[in-house]
Amino acid sequence: MGEFKVHRVRFFNYVPSGIRCVAYNNQSNRLAVSRTDGTVEIYNLSANYFQEKFFPGHESRATEALCWANGQRLFSAGLNGEIIEYDLQALNIKYAMDAFGGPIWSMAASPNGSQLLVGCEDGSVKLFQITPDKIQFERNFDRQKSRILSLSWHPAGTHIAAGSIDYISVFDVKSGSAIHKMLVDRQYMGVSKRKCIIWGVAFLSDGTVISVDSAGKVQFWDSATGTLVKNHLIANADVQSIAISDQEDSFVVGTAEGTVFHFQLVSVTSSSSEKQWVRTKPFQHHTHDVRAVAHSPIALISGGTDTHLVIRPLMEKVEVKNYDAALRKITFPHRRLVSCAKKKQLLLFQFAHHLELWRLGSTVATGKNGDTLPLSKNADHLLHLKTKGPENIICSCISPCGSWIAYSTASRFFLYRLNYEHDNINLQRVSKMPAFLRSALQILFSEDSTKLFVASNQGSVHVIRLLEGSFKHLHTFQPQSGTVESMCLLAVSPDGNWLAASGTSAGVHVYNVKQLKLHCTVPAYNFPVTALAIAPNTNNLVIAHSDQQVFEYSIPDKQYTQWSRTIQKQGFHHLWLQRDTPITHISFHPKRPMHILLHDAYMFCIIDKSLPLPNDKTLLYNPLPPTNESDIIRRRTAHAFKISKKYKPLLFMDLLDERTLVAVERPLDDIIAQLPPPIKKKKFGT
């Protein structure tokens, strides 16, 4: 693998936002997740649960409800009283519409996807018609006395259940009037509480309404008579969320204690056709409140205050007991939040509303392999750059020379020139940025820091020449005719002649920067691109996909390299393909052209193309053989993949020079320590 001096960085104080809502789309097998800062993420469950799209947050958008409607259309609503529809192609907000009912607490799409229902602070339930371009207000239902916190449609679309404070209302859709009002018992562990909040409702085909509430109960109601049928007390705290399967044979609930319970419809006896709801499995994968749950055909999905998105496969639904049956925990975004100025040994950290610039520490001490050396000079916090306005930062980058910083929000692009005078930094903002640079999805500087490449949400890529304190627009690479696919990943060759751009689907376009034209398009692949980079000297483009496949494409020859064809013919090691975190960064060793360096959140790998590929019978995570072994045995156990799992969770890793690595870690315990304390539960023996 080679010996490297490693800067182990743990001062990136990044804390993901908590998860507020999740919404599963059965048609596209995608999951939408909204966080407490207003960020909305979309995960492709068919593509190894890759986070393929995201919409940046906003200070005034506290999302309380999220749902899919009419096939592939995504809507959210929140405490600012607006209903928002997202443009999934351009990755921006299509429009925001005021519902005129105060803060919105709940939202549900009709079973046929043509209507949208919202529950408001003023007790109103409003029905909207979904038109091809927008949504249109249709009518109000009977107003209730308190806010509408949860909504559910009857699968036939004829009735609606609405959860409020102390009662559940059942509405007739045709007339808009309430036909039943079911009072919920305020008793909580034998003590009468002042209020009982109905956090979630689910309407079944047989007319049963299932409710979850702040008294820790799961209750079953008969909507025809308005009576309570069955009661389950499952928690000493709030039951905050519920989701039911399409077949209505199981449902999942999440509690404020961090527990997820699975209920299933099972036969009373082996010979009986009569069935009843039984609590079958509890899962404790969260430390804090489980604010949102979803039920896909093969998995239970949950998220909450502890920021983890947990996917728990249903073992009885998984046909082959392979890694698809394993639990997944997604904590960090599948995109880079760290950029590096190698020449000045600077790191730029991206937060929601500010950037931090740090200079790495140094040491004069020496030691053996594996030693931790004391710092002779500590890391310096050089700059804290706060954004203006309520929008979150989408992307950011520092130039390799450390003299430029660029970042973008949803509506503004910022470019700064940095001048260093000893330990002081003079920051000069480049003014009058052109309007077409707004809302950049990806920013990248050339290796010599003379050019800036900006990928817009309209599918175009802008080329900017950087001058002393100013800039000049050189060219815009327009998207292919008939497409408005957003470009999310960029890679430039070290010589500055080639630019690769990848969109939200699987395509990669390669542009000739000197001639300012499209050079070629890499053949499409079924899974989205997670990382790409262009090698020095050879100009080979290395592409990683969400299914853990890695391809090498020769840009000059416009074809896959022989090494890439060999690895596709033989296939990757099964343990390599079973990793569940995507590769987020690829780089190259300046003096070793046969080496490819890449990493995901839990491993760092050097692929040596000169060595044979490992097959399924060899050890993939190959420990270094003892030094007293003969060269023959050492050669026999050596293969192309050299993997280190020492650094994790790994947000960023790259070469500073040929003998020095920088690794940015974010231990999960540090994140949990900054969250509010969880509900205290008494454990046996304490």
Image (cartoon, grey):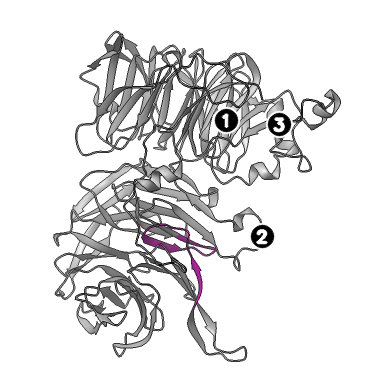
Q: Residue at x 19, y 76 (%)?
A: 194
Q: Quadrant of residue 392?
A: top left
Q: Position of residue 67 (x, y in %)?
A: 34, 59
Please tell me which of labels 1 and 2 falls first in the chain: 2
* Magenta stretch contains residue 567: no
**What residue is disc 3 on?**
565
Residue that badge 1 annotates: 598
Tell me if mark 3 has few (under 14), some (14-19) or many (20+) residues whose alpha carbon lies within 10 angstroms of its own.
some
User: From the viewer's perspective, is residue 437 above or below residue 266?
Assistant: above
Q: Residues within 10 Å of mark 1 (few under 14, many from 20)?
A: many
In which quadrant of the rendered image does the C terminus lie?
bottom left
Magenta region, residue range: 279-301
Q: Which amino acid does label 3 sit on?
A: Arg
Q: Which of marks 2 and 3 is nearer the N terminus?
A: 2
Please identify, in this view, whether the residue under mark 2 or under mark 3 is nearer the observer. Answer: 2
Residue type, label 1: Leu
Q: Is residue 50 left or right of residue 445?
A: right
Callout 1: SS? strand
Residue 287 falls inside the magenta stretch: yes
Using the rendered image of the protein, determine whether residue 245 is visible from the camera's viewpoint.
no
Q: In this view, does 216 lie above or below 557?
A: below
Q: Is residue 604 above or below residue 56?
A: above
**Residue marked by disc 2:** 321
Residue drawn 32% across the image and 85% down it? 223
Where residue 27 appears, x then y in whole percent? 47, 59
